[in-house]
Amino acid sequence: MQDKIHSSYKQLEQRSKYTNMFLRWFLYLVLILFALYFIFPLYVMIVTSLKTMEEIRQGTLLTWPSGLNFDSWAVAWGGRGYGAGDTFLKPYFWNSIKMVVPAVFFSTFIGAMTGYVLTKWRFKGDQWVFLFLLFGCFIPFQAILLPMARTLGVLGISNSVIGLVLVHTVYGIPFTTLFFRNYYISVPTELVKAARIDGAGFFKIFFKILLPISAPIIVVTVIWQFTQIWNDFLFGSTFSFGEAAPIQVALNNMVLSSTSVKEYNVDMASAIIAGVPTLIVYVLAGKYFIRGLTSGAVKG
Amino acid sequence: MKTLKIDELSKNFGTTEVLRKINLEIDEGNFLVLLGPSGCGKSTLLNIIAGLETINEGNVYIDDYNVSKVEPKDRNIAMVFQSYALYPSMNVRENMIFGLKQAKVSKEKIEEQLQKVSKFLQVDALLERKPSQLSGGQRQRVAIGRALVREPRIFLFDEPLSNLDAKLRVEMRREIKKLHQQLKTTVVYVTHDQTEAMSLGTNIAIMNHGVIQQNDTPENIYNKPSNTFVADFIGSPSMNLIKGNLKQSSNQISFVANGSNFEIPINGYEFKEKSNLENKEVYFGIRPEHIFSKKSNEGDFEINLRADLSEYIGHEQIMTFDYENQEVLAKFPSTIKIELSKNTKLYFDLTQISLFDAKTEERI
């Protein structure tokens, strides 16, 4: 009797083993297919950027390049060396860096401040302030182009990197505030009370108590803001032109303004160069992000 | 000189009245417990003493100095919080000296204080650890240490033990008691736990709906509750409040429960005022622990009640009896066997009773 039961258990065990194995392989298969699907454009871009125009014309999209030929990368980055009409990414890349670093810094910092005030120094009507700030997250940016252009004009910083820094800072604040407010709301207010009794003031509490435990949300905010600002095309193309343009605008000009032949290899190299910084930020900061999440700094 | 005096203090949040005309005084070295159900305003009162909340009306005096508009850091107080509120990014040492550093105390003095306090609280081995690496009890100790190093005039405790598990809570309770015995600093302690309040306080102020119901020694709170709220709040299970009327004849006062014609003589009761007692509607209050199954005192009053329910809790049992459709609870040692659904002889210790006016619910 017992043997019978046991053998039936054995059968069940075998069966579930096979089912599990099948499902596992199926899962891998699906994942691999998706991975291929997503990596395919990147493959085409990299491969094309390493080919000469000759190879591109003769081969297909998927053909392997004859060798590691970085000429088109050099052209994309530094140009061909002849004067007028030669657009290349280098100056615009630095424009973007000069724009994105201060814009990310200021918007993150101001967001942290407002989040701190909205949660730890509550005042009458603070929920209304927060609501209006949130409103900023939902405004279609096309709607504010004209007033913003006028504002920049009045301030005398239109068509400059500083102007773009201002625009991105202002429109980053709603998001950064939202991030920091939601983070600080889970930090016990008793911390602030204890610090007040200990004699710390508004700024000391912010810098000494709250900022040191904000690493996870700072990383999230920085990734978000960096990606948004680096990849922005609308503000860049509206509020700047010529030499003050950020990289995404330059990339567009470069690809569209080719006169005679479409240089696919140079276009691909340029597109990769324009996309690399966000990737780097993800890879570097993503690590800290996970570390920040698992350290459990606040929980009592 | 009173170490702390609160004078006609009122506080509202918008239209809700949180505290109503609070008056309190504490002498040097006393341990005052603010006790009450959640939402009674006790934590708000503590925050006001600390200077973390503003006042709508009235004043707070520390050492006879009006501190109503003084910043928390300048009030010479220290506070221990329920969540410990240790600064997560700082280690124990930095946590403990943060306040002294803000006050620009000299380095030598800070080090001296830190050594003294950390030894005293046995956290000197933990100084380099972060709060996240400490156990609940250790965190509590560091939080107390952070308060101690400042050598405040008044210690404020805001439910400091409610985050600990039951066993640790009892241990830390004893430590706080010891601490107070050794340091003799004035303490204001907020809790909703009556055992904590009774065992720690030299004085207990029981609060409800923003009003102090009774401010007295633990003994008086227990023996002579000033109204039915206090009577009901203190004690577990709480005091039996039997509804009935008083009967007065020539020199005899007695209590008759509703629906009964059985008189309980209460000549020995100390009335606040002995007039107008005839036919007064009252609550007859007797604690479950003052009902016995055997006659222990000469004055004990014998009564026959039906046992309805028995709750066994190890060292004792709580029995529910029926007294003319009113429930009466009694506490007995668990060794005594009482049959259910049968009338049992019980003995009320009449020296321990309380009487309350049924209308005003105040002690008479």
Image (cartoon, rainbow, N blue to C red):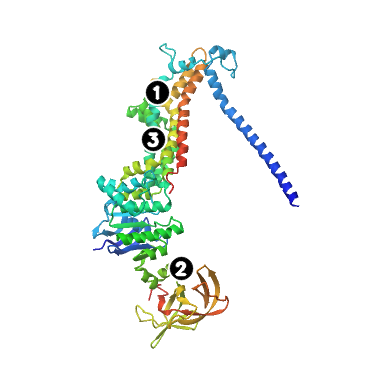
Labels in figure, total? 3
| Circles 2, 1 touching at the beta carbon (< 8 Å) | no
The answer to whether A76 is drawn above or below residue B84 in the figure is: above
Q: On what subunit does the disc labeled 1 rest?
A: A
**Mark 3: few, some, or many residues within 10 Å (few <14, many ≥20)?**
many
Query: Residue B236, labelled with which disc?
Result: 2
Q: On what subunit does the disc labeled 2 rest?
A: B
The image shows residue B44 at horizontal and vertical percentages of 36, 57
SS at circle 2: loop
Q: On what subunit does the disc labeled 3 rest?
A: A
Asked which quadrant contains residue A112, the reply is top left
User: How far apart are the alpha carbons under marks 3 and 2?
Assistant: 57 Å
Question: Where is mark 1, residue-wise?
Answer: A94
Asked which quadrant contains residue B12, the reply is bottom left
| Viewer-nearest residue: A40 or A154 | A40
The answer to whether B263 is drawn above or below residue B8 in the figure is: below
Which amino acid type is shown beneath numbered disc 3?
Ser
SS at circle 1: helix
Which amino acid type is shown beneath numbered disc 2?
Ser
Question: Where is mark 3, residue-wise?
Answer: A107
Q: Is residue B91 visible?
A: yes
Q: Is residue B185 visible?
A: no
